[in-house]
């Protein structure tokens, strides 16, 4: 019995060192780090889930604030990283219509490895 309790205590201690609370709370960010870079001030979009495929980058200098930006091509985006420093709303509709799905992501560093819908357009907000 004493050996079993000692073994269990060691296993729990080892498990605690392998997975810290910060890592457990942010699995999307951890996964994003291994998939490629998205620099500060950028909105990065990927056509595949898990940041798969060729990344498209949008910056504030080339994007009108609060304007609908449709994504080119038919692929859309299935994963994204928002490091613009501003909120970004993604839309299922290519016209930023609110009849389809849409979601706003904070700009301080949001990674989304799998969007619940195909992103066809986005808006970057002032604040």
Image: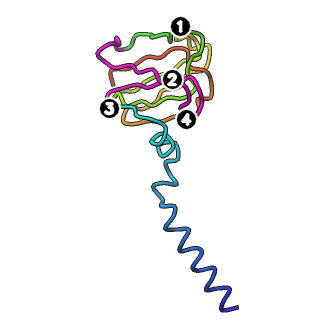
Q: CA distance from mark 1 to mark 4?
A: 23 Å
Question: Residue 31 bears which disc, if any?
Answer: none
Q: Compared to 74, does 115 lie above or below? A: below
Which of pointers 3 and 4 lies earlier in the amino acid sequence?
A: 3
- At 41% from the left and 21% from the top, the residue drawn is 57
Image spot of residue 24 (x, y percent): 52, 54
Which of pointers 1 and 2 lies earlier in the amino acid sequence?
A: 2
- At 34% from the left and 11% from the top, the residue drawn is 64
Q: Which residues are magenta?
A: 41-65
- At 37% from the left and 20% from the top, the residue drawn is 125
Image spot of residue 21 (x, y percent): 48, 59
Q: Compared to 79, does 1 lie above or below? A: below
Number of the front mark, 3 or 2? 2
Question: Residue 113 bears which disc, if any?
Answer: 4
Q: Which residue is mark 2?
A: 54
Q: Which secondary structure, mark 1?
A: loop
Number of the front mark, 1 or 4? 4
Which of pointers 3 and 2 lies earlier in the amino acid sequence?
A: 3
Instruction: Locate the N terminus and report the quarter of the image it occupies.
Output: bottom right
Q: CA distance from mark 3 to mark 4?
A: 18 Å
Which of pointers 4 and 2 lies earlier in the amino acid sequence?
A: 2
Mark 4: few/some/many CA within 10 Å (<14, 14-19, 20+): many
60 is within the stretch colored magenta: yes
Q: Which residue is mark 1?
A: 95
Mark 2: few/some/many CA within 10 Å (<14, 14-19, 20+): few
Along the horizontal axis of the image, is 48 left or right of 42? Answer: right
Instruction: Locate the C terminus and report the quarter of the image it occupies.
Output: top left
Image spot of residue 80 (x, y percent): 49, 29
Q: Which residue is mark 3?
A: 40
Q: Which secondary structure, mark 3?
A: loop
- At 51% from the left and 64% from the top, the residue drawn is 18
Mark 3: few/some/many CA within 10 Å (<14, 14-19, 20+): some
């Amino acid at each position: 019995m004493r050996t079993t309790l000692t073994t269990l205590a060691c296993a729990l201690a080892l498990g605690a060192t392998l997975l810290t609370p910060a890592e457990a709370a942010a699995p999307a960010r951890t996964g994003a780090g291994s998939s490629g870079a998205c620099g500060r001030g950028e909105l990065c979009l990927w056509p595949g889930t898990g940041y798969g495929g060729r990344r498209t980058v949008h910056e504030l200098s080339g994007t009108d604030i609060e304007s609908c930006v449709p994504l080119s091509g038919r692929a859309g985006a299935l994963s994204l990283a928002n490091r613009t420093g501003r909120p970004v709303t993604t839309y299922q509709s290519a016209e930023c219509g609110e009849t389809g799905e849409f979601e706003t992501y904070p700009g301080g560093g949001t990674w989304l490895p799998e969007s619940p819908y195909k992103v066809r357009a986005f808006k970057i907000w002032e604040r």
